[in-house]
Image (spheres, grey):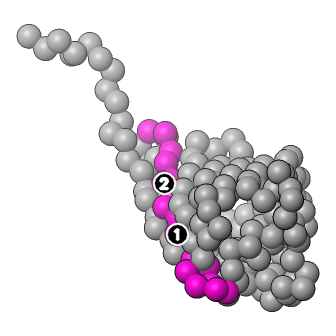
């Protein structure tokens, strides 16, 4: 006799995993200083097309950077599949949370969460940032994108994963430009901060 026959059917847990590696022409101290600047996330997301950026929390020390923010982004329905147009309006609020931790002079860990407000999908990224040589840093992240929607959940995950991939490429390009525009002489000194 079946002991679990009365159990409700459960959607097999599907998710999409993305692996990302990016190089930065800056040592970890300089990259850390850029990520910890108050203007960095706001300037980044406005440059990348957000119509509004609301920073809920930005805390930066020599050992930790924590950022929580929301950004409003316009949505062009032409790039959406027809099934997704009924889920997403002409503008979407996206919530971000990132936590960066220094684990050594040339190494840090990262944990990031991105979720569109009101939609049943989210992305969670984890990884490391390592200074591979003086003046060069490599960030390696693994992202898991998941949705709990029945039937079309995997389609939603795939669409959001594509958006995450595109956004991370644009984020990297912005950061390279930001580092160039805010050269070493402008880096914020975290020495002595707790």
Q: Residues within 10 Å of mark 1 (few under 14, many from 20)?
A: some
Q: Residue 107: which disc?
A: none
Please indicate whether residue 147 sits to the left or right of residue 181 in the image: left
- Find numbered disc 2 in the image and state the secondary structure of the residue it sits on: strand
Residue 149 in magenta stretch: yes
Q: Which residues are magenta?
A: 132-150
Q: Residues within 10 Å of mark 2 (few under 14, many from 20)?
A: some
Q: Residue 175 in the image: x percent, y percent?
A: 74, 78
Q: Residue 120 in the image: x percent, y percent?
A: 58, 42
* Residue at 69% across, 80% down: 27
* Residue 163 higher or lower than 103, as above or below: below
Q: Residue furthest front?
A: 192
Q: Residue 15 in the image: x percent, y percent?
A: 42, 51
* Residue at 49% across, 61% down: 142
- Find numbered disc 1 in the image and state the secondary structure of the residue it sits on: strand
Please indicate whether residue 120 sits to the left or right of residue 61 in the image: left
Residue 76 visible in the shown view: yes
Q: Residue furthest left?
A: 1
Residue 172 in magenta stretch: no
- Per the image, the residue denoted by label 2 is 144
* Residue 179 higher or lower than 2, as above or below: below
Residue nearest the viewer, comparing 170 with 59: 59
In the rendered image, which quarter is residue 119 located in? top right
Magenta part, dominant SS: strand
* Residue 128 higher or lower than 120, as above or below: below
Select label 1 or label 2 by which is in front.
1
Residue 45 visible in the shown view: no
In the rendered image, which quarter is residue 12 located in? top left
- Per the image, the residue denoted by label 1 is 140
- The alpha-carbon separation of the residues under discs 1 and 2 comes to 14 Å
Which corner quadrant holds the N terminus? top left
């Amino acid at each position: 006799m079946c002991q679990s026959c009365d159990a409700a059917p459960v959607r097999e847990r599907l998710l999409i995993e993305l692996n990302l590696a990016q190089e930065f022409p800056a040592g970890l101290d300089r990259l850390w200083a850029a990520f910890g600047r108050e203007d960095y996330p706001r300037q980044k997301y406005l440059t990348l097309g957000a119509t509004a950026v609301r920073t809920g929390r930005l805390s930066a020390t020599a050992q930790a950077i924590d950022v929580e923010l929301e950004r409003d982004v316009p949505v062009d329905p032409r790039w959406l599949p027809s099934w997704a147009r009924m889920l997403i309006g002409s503008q979407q609020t996206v919530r971000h949370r990132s936590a960066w931790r220094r684990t050594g002079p040339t190494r840090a860990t990262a944990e990031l969460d991105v979720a569109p407000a009101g939609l049943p999908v989210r992305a969670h990224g984890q990884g490391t940032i390592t200074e591979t040589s003086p003046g060069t840093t490599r960030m390696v992240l693994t992202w898991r994108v998941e949705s709990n929607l029945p039937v079309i959940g995997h389609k939603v995950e795939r669409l959001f994963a594509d958006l995450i991939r595109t956004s991370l490429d644009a984020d990297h390009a912005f950061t390279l430009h930001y580092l160039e525009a805010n050269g070493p002489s402008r880096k914020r000194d975290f020495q002595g901060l707790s």
